[in-house]
Amino acid sequence: MITVEALTKTYSRFTAVNDVSFSARAGRVTGFLGPNGAGKSTTMRMMVGLTAPTSGTATIKGRAFADLPNPGLEVGVLLDASAQHAGRTGREILGIAQRTMGLPRARVDEMLHKVSLTDEEAERRVKNYSLGMRQRLGIATALIGDPEVLILDEPANGLDPAGIRWMRDLLREYADKGGAVLLSSHLLHEIEVVADDLVVIGNGRIVAQGTKADLLAAAGTLARADRPAELAAALRGAGITCTLNADGSVRTDVGAAAVGQIALQSGIALVELRSADSAGLEEMFLELTATSQRDSTTPSTERSAA
């Protein structure tokens, strides 16, 4: 439902987004990942017409966002929860969206209930909202038109653990009903749990994309043995490149069956043998974006400023 083709944005001599192409399909959650300054937010802003691309196209259901007759009925967007009008109440903001889209008044209360904002909270001015409450209101605004596509930049920012779980379940339900979700987040664990597909960007370029299962499976195999140094030597003797980690584990790109066979032939007892994909998304992310990390020690825990 979302198609990005050769999207590029250049500012003077700086290229923020360089020839980016990917898609987000119906019925799936697509995680859009990258370190600080990688180009995620710029890409998303171009997708919804807030930033003009230097070249390339972004279409939603085959049309540019600006060409959609009533965009909120087809695509829900949340790029910055803090950009809401601070002087209006939550109910007023949803009411404006409801009237703009030509929806029945009942949709306002439906959305307040859906995102768990109480009647009392709905009557507060947004300037008195916590960031988590603003996120809930932003999600309500994105969903009010019952769109088929959601484009969300850091929707879990400011939510407590219960709120993150709520949001994750909400997006999973939305995709399972046939919607397409493009989700940017610095909370890698949450992306790992909810995403079906991954698009990884670094230095303005796509460095990897595919299904989550395929990308994580490429992580290889991790093994532990009673004699790890001998296991590593046996693998290398068989022409297999491997790494002996400080914790005694041995990691290699070949499959678990090959590692097990070599260990058996060498008389080495294995105490653990598994796919290294359980090391998770963080390790894959760090490896793919190693050359574009702004802060090499904590890239996965900081708010994206892309």
Image (cartoon, grey):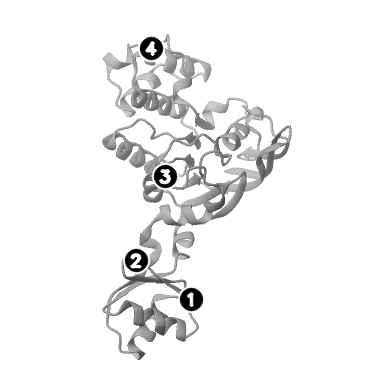
Question: Relative to 12, is 208 above or below?
Answer: below
In the structure shown, which secondary structural element does the residue marked by tag 4 occupy?
loop
Q: Residue at x 36, y 81 (%)?
A: 231
Tell me which corner region of the image, top left, top right, bottom left or bottom right, holds residue 9.
Answer: top right
How far apart marks 3 and 4 lie (CA) works out to: 37 Å
In-front residue for pair 127/56: 127
Q: Do the residues labelled 2 and 4 touch (CB within 8 Å)?
A: no
Q: Do the residues labelled 1 and 2 touch (CB within 8 Å)?
A: no
Residue 241 - label: 1
Three-letter code, disc 4:
Thr
In-front residue for pair 156/282: 282
In the structure shown, which secondary structural element does the residue marked by tag 2 occupy?
loop
| CA neighbours of label 2 inside 10 A, class few (<14), some (14 to 19), many (20+) | few
Nearest to the eye among marks 3 and 2: give it.
2
Residue at the disc numbered 2: 246
Q: Which residue is drawn at 38% across and 23% down?
A: 134
The image shows residue 70 at horizontal and vertical percentages of 58, 25
| CA neighbours of label 4 inside 10 A, class few (<14), some (14 to 19), many (20+) | many
Residue at the disc numbered 4: 89
In the structure shown, which secondary structural element does the residue marked by tag 1 occupy?
loop
Three-letter code, disc 1:
Thr
